[in-house]
């Protein structure tokens, strides 16, 4: 079945959205598919590695903050005891 027959059938069933759908499909070259931009290449290797999204980056930030907090807990506690508790005795 040619694409024009399928396009005509789809447009016949579109109802109230017929004009907008017709305009969208005919602007893409009449093939019934949306036109792709000129830049269809994917991201480079470094871009793909660093493109994690918001969720994983938030998780990594929370884990990093927790690690820094736990790592600094001992030295801060030792400094506090040496500075304030020992001098008050």
Image (cartoon, rainbow, N blue to C red):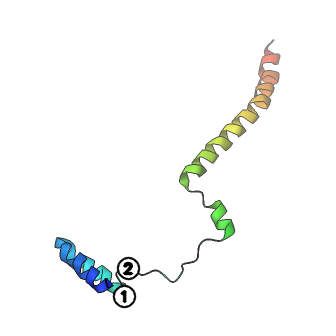
**Which quadrant is the C terminus positioned in?**
top right
Against 78, residue 8 (above or below) is below
Q: In the image, residue 65 lies at what x, y percent?
A: 66, 41
Q: In the image, residue 43 lies at what x, y percent?
A: 61, 71
Against 59, residue 86 (above or below) is above
Of residue 6 and residue 47, the one placed in the foreground of this image is: 6
**Left or right: where does residue 30 sit relative to residue 79?**
left
Q: In the image, residue 59 lies at what x, y percent?
A: 60, 45
Q: Marks 1 and 2: in contact by CB < 8 Å?
A: yes
**Left or right: where does residue 12 sit relative to residue 2?**
left
Q: Quadrant of residue 10?
A: bottom left
Residue at image x 37%, y 88%? 29
Identify the residue under disc 2: 33
Residue at image x 29%, y 86%? 4
Which mark, residue 29?
1
Of residue 46 and residue 31, the one placed in the foreground of this image is: 31
Q: Quadrant of residue 44?
A: bottom right
Residue reaching furthest left? 16
Against 73, residue 58 (above or below) is below
């Amino acid at each position: 079945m040619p694409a024009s027959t399928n396009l005509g059938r789809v447009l016949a069933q579109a109802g109230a959205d017929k004009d907008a759908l017709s305009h969208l499909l005919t602007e893409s070259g009449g093939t019934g598919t949306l036109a792709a931009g000129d830049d269809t290449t994917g991201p480079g290797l470094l871009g793909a590695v660093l493109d994690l999204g918001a969720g994983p980056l938030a998780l990594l930030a929370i884990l990093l903050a927790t690690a820094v907090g736990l790592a600094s807990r001992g030295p801060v506690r030792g400094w506090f005891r040496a500075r304030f508790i020992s001098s008050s005795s």
